[in-house]
């Protein structure tokens, strides 16, 4: 298989007005790995993710998704790149006025012209894969927070994307449900080979699930540590990194 | 997909003695789903055999997605229906993981579901509707009770009511509503004036058009139209505002902080509307009568002086003030219902929209309902 990194971030700088959030950030994400972006609150994790999925364009720098620069892509080309992504937003982003089935169907209807029968089977399959079989007729307001996240994941997976992106998949969930989110991420990753890009501040999940991490920090407007999270925990001497991975309050 | 339409098969079937070997040719993707489904529907996959094998050895599996799983399940289903042995061969291990993940769970049992007949469900829904209506009225009564308690307590707890918001709402719900109310009631006056003139002229009772327009506007039309406009402008605004606060847990925060919702949110709004609407109505009275005057002068043989003198004898204080007091009641109802509906919102944005609509509908309904009751009562009292 292709061993080129699936996502290449090169010299990305993000500014809001005059405030620099990220400066000259570069890193690679390998095919099929679980990659996590960690760091304190407000350090720019979500901002980084928004650049990668093309919601915003950085002031400077390039981001290659499977060889194509998403920062320069427009129109149809961009839509093609976006098809490679499934994104799970922090609050789920399910359409509240639609049932779970309709939430998934809307993606399938947009990108394919499969029959109703086939669509129903697919929806059943996707909901089953996140443990929500039989909930297709429920509205998002009728299910719990953890179920909403899983439903949003089912929607993100509707088109079997190459890359799944998560913004804080475990935020607002109890530890057990959070752990089950991590388990789902690992399961999807090993079974489907999907590259997972996860923004997280949940240390437990980072240590058990991530293959690779970058840690962002406000002080440098960028990466202060990267690599295998278990090694970082054991070896990194930087006080910020050390306190994050060893749960020490600043 | 288009390429596949013409005589190109999606899959091939090799028949041997009593085994069928099925080899997919086109990539098993959602793009090809329709083509595959079509061929599956038109070919007899399982006939007179004891075993069917799905062979992926030659299949193009570089490109695949969830349709792979659906296709396998379809064939498996065929085999099961015909009681034939089913096997898969040549599926690479990573594809196998993919298929396993999705099929393991899809074959798991569905959670228990109630299986009512359609009539049963219909009756159940009807019952639920009534239950909801009952609950709705119950909540409205509860809300009214709470509001009245807050009103009674108000003189003793003046400091707790958020008066800071009062001028803002007075301005937004009252002052800003003046131009549109004046315009609408003026036009209503003109319409009334023309219609009245047409009828009264036939009896030579031209001058009585002043009575007709004056009393109808002051007693009924001006308070009614003003209240309906305020329901559309402010009732809905209150519902949307408070509803949004409710779904973003701001109301919950207020409650846990021990702040009284009625004093903090409801009273400033309700009082602002109740005390601004009589001024609008008074101005609208004037504007409606000018509309009627305009219509009379342009169609009938009367003078401005004559109209005004006749109006002066016909229109009593009772007419004017019953209209203005009525408008205060309407304003109170409309604003309360706006707040009530807002507090009922729960869940998400779509719920806010639903209850904003409900605020206007219930508001207008209550206006008309209370107006009919009042008209009757005032009639009996001879006011
Ligand atoms: N659209 C925006 N406009 C201005 N500032 C923003 C915007 N989005 C994020 N920020 C700022 O960027 C910083 C990083 O935000 P974010 O990426 O959301 O942090 P987190 O790491 O907690 O996800 C924050 O200080 C935030 O205030
Ligand atoms: Mg964030």
Image (spheres, rainbow, N blue to C red):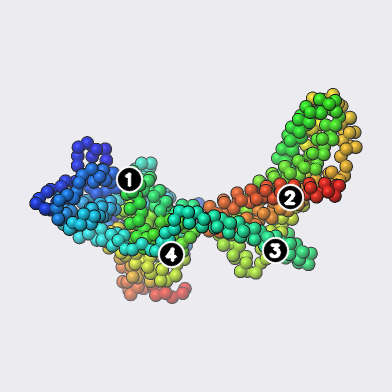
Q: Chain of mark 1?
A: A
User: How far apart in space, not on screen, are marks 3 and 1 (Cα)?
Assistant: 55 Å
Residue A165 seen anywhere in this rendered image of the structure: no
Badge 1 marks a residue whose secondary structure is: loop
Q: Chain of mark 2?
A: B
- Left or right of residue A221: residue B200: right
- Observer-nearest of B381 and A58: B381
Q: Earlier in the sequence, mark 2 or mark 3?
A: 3
Q: Earlier in the sequence, mark 1 or mark 4?
A: 1
**Which residue lies under the disc numbered 3?**
B146
- Numbered label attached to residue A114: 1
- Left or right of residue B358: residue A184: left
Residue found at x 21% / y 54%: B82
Tell me residue B206's x, y (percent).
Answer: 84, 27
Is disc 4 on the same chain as disc 3?
A: no
Residue found at x 36% / y 66%: A182
- Some atom of ligand 2 lies within 8 Å of the CB belonging to the residue at label 4: no
Question: In the picture shown, does residue B120 fall above or below B29?
Answer: below
Badge 3 marks a residue whose secondary structure is: helix
């Amino acid at each position: 298989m292709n061993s080129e990194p699936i996502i290449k971030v090169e010299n990305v700088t993000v500014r809001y007005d005059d405030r620099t959030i990220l400066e000259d950030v570069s890193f690679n994400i390998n095919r099929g790995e679980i990659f996590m972006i960690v760091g304190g609150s407000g350090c720019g994790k979500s901002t980084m993710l928004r650049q990668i999925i093309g919601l915003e364009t950085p002031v400077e720098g390039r981001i290659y998704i499977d060889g194509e620069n998403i920062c320069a892509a427009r129109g149809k080309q961009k839509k093609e790149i976006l098809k490679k992504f499934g994104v799970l937003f922090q609050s789920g982003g399910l359409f509240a006025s639609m049932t779970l089935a309709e939430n998934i169907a809307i993606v399938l209807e947009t990108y394919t012209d499969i029959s109703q029968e086939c669509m129903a089977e697919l929806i059943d399959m996707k909901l089953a894969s996140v443990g929500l079989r039989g909930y297709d007729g429920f509205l998002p307001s009728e299910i719990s927070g953890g179920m909403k996240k899983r439903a949003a994941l089912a929607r993100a997976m509707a088109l079997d994307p190459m890359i799944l992106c998560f913004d804080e998949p475990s935020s607002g969930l109890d530890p057990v449900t959070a752990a089950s989110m991590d388990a789902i991420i690992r399961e999807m990753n090993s079974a489907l080979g999907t590259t997972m890009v996860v923004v997280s501040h949940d240390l437990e999940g980072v240590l058990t699930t991530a293959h690779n991490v970058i840690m962002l920090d406000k002080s440098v407007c960028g990466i202060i540590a990267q690599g295998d999270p278990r090694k970082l925990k054991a070896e990194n001497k930087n006080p910020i990194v050390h306190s994050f991975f060893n749960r020490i309050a600043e | 997909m288009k390429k596949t339409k013409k005589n190109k098969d999606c899959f091939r079937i090799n028949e041997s003695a009593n085994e069928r070997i099925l080899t997919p040719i086109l990539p098993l993707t959602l793009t090809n789903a329709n083509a595959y489904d079509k061929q599956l529907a038109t070919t007899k996959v399982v006939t007179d055999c004891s075993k069917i094998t799905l062979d992926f050895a030659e299949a193009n599996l570089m490109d695949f997605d969830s349709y792979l799983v659906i296709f396998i399940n379809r064939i498996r289903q065929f085999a099961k229906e015909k009681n034939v042995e089913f096997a898969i061969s040549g599926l690479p291990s990573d594809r196998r993981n993919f298929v396993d993940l999705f099929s393991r769970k899809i074959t798991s049992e569905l959670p228990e579901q109630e299986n009512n007949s359609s009539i049963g469900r219909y009756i159940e829904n009807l019952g639920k509707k009534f239950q909801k209506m009952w609950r709705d009225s119950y909540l409205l009564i509860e809300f009214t009770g709470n509001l009245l308690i807050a009103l009674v307590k108000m003189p003793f707890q003046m400091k707790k009511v958020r008066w800071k918001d009062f001028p803002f709402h007075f301005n937004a719900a009252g002052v800003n509503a003046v131009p549109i109310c004046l315009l609408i009631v003026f036009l209503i006056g003109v319409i009334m004036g023309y219609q009245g003139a047409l009828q009264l002229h036939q009896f030579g009772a031209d001058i009585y058009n002043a009575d007709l327009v004056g009393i109808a506007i002051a007693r009924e039309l001006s308070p009614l139209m003003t209240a309906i406009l305020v329901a559309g402008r402010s009732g809905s605004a209150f519902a949307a505002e408070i509803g949004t606060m409710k779904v973003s847990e701001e109301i919950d925060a207020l409650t846990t902080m021990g702040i009284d919702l009625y004093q903090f949110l409801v009273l400033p709004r309700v009082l602002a509307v109740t005390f601004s609407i009589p001024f609008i109505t008074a101005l609208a009275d004037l504007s409606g009568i000018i509309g009627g005057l305009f219509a009379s002068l342009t169609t009938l043989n009367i003078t401005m002086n004559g109209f005004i003198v006749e109006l002066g004898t016909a229109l009593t204080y009772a007419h004017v003030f019953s209209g203005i007091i009525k408008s205060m009641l309407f304003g109170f109802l409309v604003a309360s219902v706006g707040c009530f509906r807002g507090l009922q919102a729960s869940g998400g944005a779509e719920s806010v929209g639903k209850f904003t609509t409900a605020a206007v509908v219930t508001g207008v309904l209550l206006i008309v309902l209370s107006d009919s009751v009042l008209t009757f009562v005032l009639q009996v009292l001879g006011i």
